[in-house]
Amino acid sequence: MTKRIALIQLGLGGVGRALVRHILAQRSHHTQRLGLSLQYIALADRDGIVINRDGLSDERLTEIVAAKAQGARLRALPQGRPWDGSPEILEDLFEPNAIVVEVTATEATVPVLRAACARGLGIVLANKLPLAGPYELFRELTANPRTRFETTVGAALPIIVTIQSFLLDTGDTIQKIRGCLSGTLNMICQRLEQGQKFSEIVRDARARGHTEPDPREDLSGRDAARKALILARLLGYPLEFEDVSRESLYPPEWDTLSIEDFLVRLSEHDARWAELSRDVQARGERLRYVVEVTEGRCQARLERLKSDDELVRPGVADSVVAVQTARYRESSLIIRGKGSGPELTASGVLADILILAR
């Protein structure tokens, strides 16, 4: 017998559209292997929503994804309606097997997440902002036993589940976590080693969709710091975002510039970055942006690492986490692999959905 799982998805950006495509492509696989049928009953973007309690057809989902890829708003599509983000319109959809999937990049979805938690629904988060917001909100959302958030740290890499299930739940004591968790900053460090100009790397990465629309979200270290904060909170440290020591890769006064002016001004620092990269390589070192959680402290900063450091694989821009514990004292537990990209992140979100569904 096939079990129906109703999905309410908030967000149809790159990750959200990739997730819909994954689910459509794997329908027969989910039925045959897992006995599951994942049915979308609502899709929402920042100001619109499409609802069909009986389930949106695959043809309709394909049309919606195509329209969103062309810049359309859900409120303007057939069956679409305006939505201000309030949970009231969704509460009639909160059936026992429903899962709320949050793949936005905003804090505006918090009321819906709280309402879903209150009803004991499954929640899958790819969005870091709610979990890196106030500590009490983190506690509220993660107290729900059906909240999963694997892709908030390291995309589809099994970092959260390893720390929670294989280490903390089994009684291991985590002493330190170090990692390179920003796909954007990993790529910048790699391409600096290849002799490319800092400003050109950033502009090209933004044009290819590898950074946030405002690349300062990555270059300021804010994105990496949020991931570090989530890891710290997993270990029980009641830290706020302001407690994370964070190094930015550009002068703080540039935060007031427009995105266009910021991108122009980046070339002013090309010579400094080129000199730093040459010096680092001349000493046999590697430049990496590293997060670290240890003894109640949390930081995110640029570091010069020895070539034999456990975080380094020369010429590779993978994400990596090294966890030092009572059991893994002499040789850290290493989790490494590609840690960014919409398709990969969507696959991690889907894995969380299927774990809850089963």
Image (cartoon, rainbow, N blue to C red):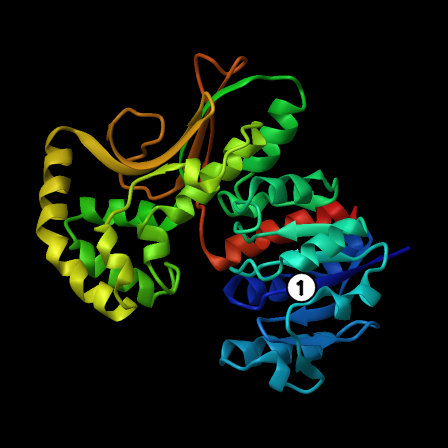
* Residue 46 on image: x %, y %: 57, 71
* Residue 95 on image: x %, y %: 85, 59
* Residue 123 on image: x %, y %: 70, 51
Question: At 67% across and 45% down in the image, what residue appears?
Answer: 141
* Residue 15 on image: x %, y %: 53, 61
**Vertical order, 183 against 82 (above or below):** above
The answer to which image quadrant residue 66 occupies is bottom right
Q: Nearest the camera: 14 or 36? A: 14
Question: At 54% across and 28% down in the image, what residue appears?
Answer: 237
Judged left or right of residue 18, residue 312 is: left
The answer to which image quadrant residue 55 occupies is bottom right
The residue carrying pointer 1 sits among few (fewer than 14), some (14 to 19) or many (20 or more) residues within 10 Å by Cα, namely: many
Question: At 38% across and 65% down in the image, what residue appears?
Answer: 213
Q: Which residue is mark 1?
A: 9
**Vertical order, 237 against 276 (above or below):** above
- Element type where label 1 sits in the image: strand
Judged left or right of residue 8, residue 189 is: left
Judged left or right of residue 328, residue 124 is: right
